[in-house]
Each structure stands twice: as structure tokens, then as C-alpha cells.
Image (cartoon, rainbow, N blue to C red):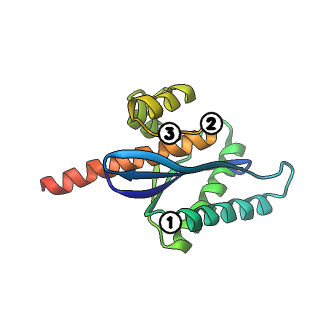
Amino acid sequence: MCEGTLLGVDPGTAAVGLAAVEAADGRLRVAWSETFRTPPGQAAGERLRRVYGAVREAIAANAPVGIAVERLMWGRNTGSAMEVSRASGVILLAAADAGIPVEEYAPLEVKMAVTGVGNATKEQLRRCLVRVLNTDGVPDEPDAADAVAVAVCHLQQSRLREMVRAAR
């Protein structure tokens, strides 16, 4: 597992889950987490500006070596999907402005990496983070817990990538 702090992000315009997960000596610890919320009824551009600012602040406060973002999966609600895709764009922009690499993971990838089950519930996801992966400090708030899961997924995937590189 790679070492350092990783920022996990569960994107949205109304609520954005953010979590700084530290990996050291094979252990995971949530150093910080929050669900950043924008005021309902606010203009889309202002909401996106606030999301960008919140991500920039999280980057400045936690100095992550990388950022993991949950990738949008298009469903039936295209209006909601469009809003999440816009939020994802400003999150990627904040990371690019800070010079931090980003990896994106589909919800199924995150659930499989954390629980081993692609259709796990949010509660099962949280329980696996705490018990199975022995992660300290997992928040109760679902968006922030999802951000932790995205970060943990990335940490596991990067470990696998390192093993493949070493085997070549």
C-alpha cells in the first residue's frame, strides 16, 4: 500500500464528501473528513465555485500526495448526473491547479475493493472500512464515509499497480 495522505472525494453540488486518509506502516487512519454542503436554491455557478473552494481548502490543509474521486455513473436521472459531472469537473480543476494527480473509480470498483461485493449498502461499506480494513476514524456521515471508501480503493489499487510493476 502506498504511504502518505490521500484525499478521497465523493462529488456532488449539494453535498461533497471529503476525507484525508493516511496510510503508514500498513495501517489506515482518517486524518480528517467532512461533508461540504452548498445552500439549496443557490445558482449553479456559485455552488460550483464553493465546491472548488472547499476542495482547494482540503488540499491546502491536508497536503495529499494524490486525490481519488468517485466517477459518475450515468443513470436515469440525467439532470442529477449533469450536476454531479459539473462538480467532478471543478474537483479535477482544483487538483490540477494544485499539481496533484487524480484517479477516478466507479462506485462498483469502490464497493468491490472495500467489501468484495459490488452491490454493498452504505452501511456495509462503512462496516467493512472499520472492521475488515481496520480503518480508524471512519465518519458516520454517508458522503464523508464514501469519500473514505474512494481513498481506500485507490490505496489498494495503487498497491496492486506497484506489485505488477515490480513483477515485470
Query: Residue 63: x, y in percent?
Result: 50, 66
Q: Which mark is residue 129?
A: none
In the picture, measured across the screen, residue 56 lies left or right of residue 23, that is right
- Residue 28 appears in the rendering: yes
Above or below, 149 against 125 in this view is below
Q: Nearer the viewer, residue 88 or 124?
A: 124
Give whichever of discs 2 and 1 has the lower sequence position. Answer: 1
Residue 112 or 20: which is nearer the viewer? 20
Of the residues shown, which amino acid type is indicated by label 3? Pro
Residue at left 42%, top 39%? Answer: 109
Instruction: Say above or below: 132 vs 74.
Output: above
Question: Is the C terminus in the top left, top right, bottom left or bottom right quadrant?
Answer: bottom left
- Residue indicated by mark 1: 63
Label 2 Cα neighbours within 10 Å, binned few <14 / some 14-19 / many ≥20: some
From mark 3 to mark 1, how far is it between C-alphas?
A: 25 Å
Hey, what amino acid is under mark 2?
Answer: Pro
Q: In this rendering, would 162 be left or right of 59?
A: left
Q: Residues within 10 Å of mark 3 (few under 14, many from 20)?
A: many
- Looking at the rendered structure, the secondary structure element under dot 2 is helix
Question: Disc 3 on helix, strand or loop?
Answer: helix
Label 3 or label 1, whichever comes before in sequence order: 1
Q: Residue at x 50, y 39 (%)?
A: 107
Q: Which residue was labeled with disc 2?
A: 142
Give the residue number, with chain letter if any, for mark 3.
Answer: 107
- Percent x, y of residue 114: 42, 35
Residue 144: percent from left, percent from top: 60, 43
| Residue 73 in view of the camera | no
Residue 67 place in picture, x, y as percent:
48, 58
Circle 2 or circle 1, nearest the eye: 1
Q: Which mark's residue is nearer the viewer, 3 or 2?
A: 2
Q: Amino acid at mark 1?
A: Ala
Q: Secondary structure at mark 1?
A: loop
